[in-house]
Image (cartoon, rainbow, N blue to C red):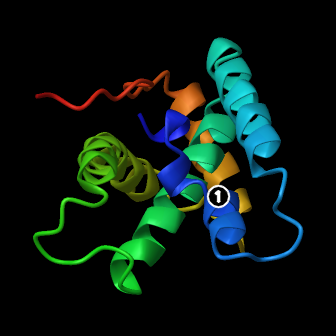
């Protein structure tokens, strides 16, 4: 699951690449997982999406900038999870945006995530909160 995977958690890579200030990435990772679980329990869609999109952005950077290569076994479970998440989210987001053309989608990712979360909640749309790779 993306929320439990340190390899899509950017502070892990910052520490791995010896960037100062990320020595406590494990504590931060636990706190972020706790925040995600709390958001899931409270049905705070915007917070859950924000955390998931942050992880997806890290995975995207790995793919685009060469952290994962063609036919490599690296990142395959993360890619499978990301594909499942995006397969659920993208059609819903497109439909919401098409049905709500007068909405202000915001200037940044956080604003768009909050608006999308609010719309998902408003229309009582759900996506699978837990993604487990199939064997």
Q: Position of residue 103 (x, y in %)?
A: 62, 58
The quarter of the picture where residue 22 lies is bottom right
Which residue is most to the top?
Answer: 41
Q: Above or below — where is 7 with respect to 133?
A: below
The structure residue drawn at horizontal position 79% and vertical position 34%, both measured from the top left corner, is: 31
The structure residue drawn at horizontal position 69% and vertical position 48%, both measured from the top left corner, is: 114
Q: Position of residue 28 (x, y in %)?
A: 80, 44
Whether residue 115 is visible here, answered yes or no, is no
Q: Above or below — where is 66 with respect to 23?
A: below
Q: Position of residue 15 (x, y in %)?
A: 71, 65
Whether residue 21 is visible here, answered yes or no, is yes
Q: Position of residue 129 (x, y in %)?
A: 45, 25
Q: Say which element carries label 1.
A: helix
Q: Above or below — where is 103 with respect to 66?
A: above
Name the quadrant of the C terminus. top left
**Between 43 and 77, which is closer to the camera in this rendering?**
77
Q: Which residue is mark 1?
A: 12
The structure residue drawn at horizontal position 49% and vertical position 27%, both measured from the top left corner, is: 123
In the displayed structure, does residue 30 sit left or right of residue 2? right
The quarter of the picture where residue 69 lies is bottom left
Crowd rating for badge 1 (residues with CA inside 10 Å; few <14, some 14–19, many 20+): some
**Between 107 and 101, which is closer to the camera in this rendering?**
107
The structure residue drawn at horizontal position 43% and vertical position 48%, both measured from the top left corner, is: 96
In the displayed structure, does residue 120 sit left or right of residue 77? right
């Amino acid at each position: 699951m993306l929320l439990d995977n340190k390899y899509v958690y950017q502070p892990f890579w910052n520490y791995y690449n010896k960037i100062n200030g990320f020595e406590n990435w494990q504590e931060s990772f636990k706190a972020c997982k706790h925040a995600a679980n709390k958001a899931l329990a409270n049905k705070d869609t915007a917070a859950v999406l924000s955390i998931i999109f942050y992880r997806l952005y890290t995975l995207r950077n790995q793919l685009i900038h060469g952290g994962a290569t063609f036919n490599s076994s690296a990142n395959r479970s993360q890619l499978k999870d990301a594909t499942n998440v995006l397969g659920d989210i993208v059609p819903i987001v497109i439909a919401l945006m098409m049905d709500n053309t007068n909405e202000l989608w915001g200037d940044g990712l956080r604003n768009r995530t909050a608006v999308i979360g609010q719309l998902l909640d408003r229309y009582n749309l759900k996506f699978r909160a837990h993604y487990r790779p199939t064997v």
